[in-house]
Image (cartoon, rainbow, N blue to C red):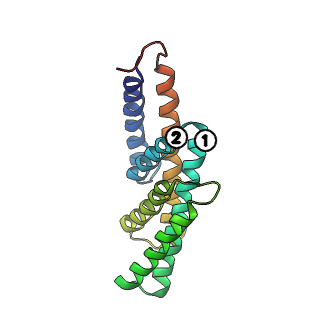
């Protein structure tokens, strides 16, 4: 089977499983899992991509949590939010220089953005207690998405014939 068809099957089936699990058993935002899934592939896939994607996503989550915490502590006004997010944005670019995130700023930004979205949807502060803490929910969703990315790649590769060239 050609790779695009094999990936269509693996991603299609596992995408449905992801939606079912996040709607019933694992209460995390499905859009965050899909973003992390894409992040896994963008950073190169495989074991290295799995680790690097999670490292980048969690780095963005931590920067978002610190930015949102600063907004909460200083006072939630548009100017405070703009300054805190601006500082956080600069921090994301600088964080992409770290050895474990090297050069993958977009994957860091995805972690940041998905955390902000999770906070907005839950309406809870980054300091909310467990199990409803939106930062931990975002981390769990990003890890779950990376797992789905890894599984879909492995399954897709297993179904791909190396004898048939991609057309």
Q: Is residue 63 left or right of residue 167?
A: right
Residue at the extreme top: 163
Specify few, some or many for label 2: CA neighbours under 10 Å numbering under 14, 14-19, or 20 or more: few
Split into 4 quadrants, where in the image is the N terminus? top left
Q: Front-most of 63 and 94?
A: 94
The image shows residue 48 at horizontal and vertical percentages of: 61, 41
Residue at the (46%, 26%) spot, across then down: 156
Q: How many marks?
A: 2
Residue at the farthest right position: 99
Q: Nearer the viewer, residue 124 or 86?
A: 86
Q: Is the Cβ of the residue at disc 2 closer than 8 Å to that at disc 1?
A: yes
Secondary structure at badge 1 equals helix
Say which mark, if any, is on residue 146. none
Can you give x and y, in whole percent of width and height, for residue 33 in the image?
A: 44, 48
Spatial separation of the CA atoms under disc 2 and disc 1 = 8 Å
Judge left or right: residue 84 versus residue 78: right
Q: Is residue 72 above or below residue 161?
A: below
**Residue closer to the observer: 122 or 146:** 146
Q: Position of residue 102 (x, y in %)?
A: 59, 54
Question: Which label number is shown at residue 48?
Answer: 1
Secondary structure under the numbered disc 2 in the rendered image: loop
- As rendered, which of 99 and 85 lies closer to the eye? 99
User: Mark 1 Cα within 10 Å, few/some/many (few <14, many 20+)?
Assistant: few
- Whether residue 101 is visible, yes or no, is yes
Residue appearing at x 50%, y 44% in the figure: 40
From the image, which quarter does the C terminus lie in? top left
**Which label sits on residue 44?**
2
Kindly identify the residue that appears in the image at 52 percent across and 63 percent down: 61
- Regarding residue 25, the answer to whether it shows in the image is no
Question: In the rendered view, would you say 73 is above or below 124?
Answer: below
């Amino acid at each position: 089977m050609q790779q695009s068809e094999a990936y269509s099957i693996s991603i299609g089936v596992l995408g449905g499983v992801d939606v079912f699990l996040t709607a019933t058993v694992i209460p995390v935002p499905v859009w965050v899992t899909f973003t992390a899934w894409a992040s896994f592939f963008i950073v190169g896939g495989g074991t290295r991509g799995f680790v690097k994607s999670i490292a980048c996503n969690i780095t963005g989550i931590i920067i978002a949590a610190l930015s949102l915490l600063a907004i909460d502590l200083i006072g939630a006004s548009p100017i405070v939010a703009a300054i805190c997010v601006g500082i956080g944005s600069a921090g994301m670019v600088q964080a992409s220089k770290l050895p474990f995130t090297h050069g993958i700023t977009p994957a860091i930004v995805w972690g940041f953005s998905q955390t902000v979205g999770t906070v907005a949807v839950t309406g809870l502060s980054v300091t909310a207690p467990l199990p409803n803490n939106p930062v931990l929910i975002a981390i769990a969703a990003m890890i779950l998405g990376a797992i789905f990315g890894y599984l879909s790649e492995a399954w897709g590769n297993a179904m791909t014939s190396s004898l048939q060239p991609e057309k």
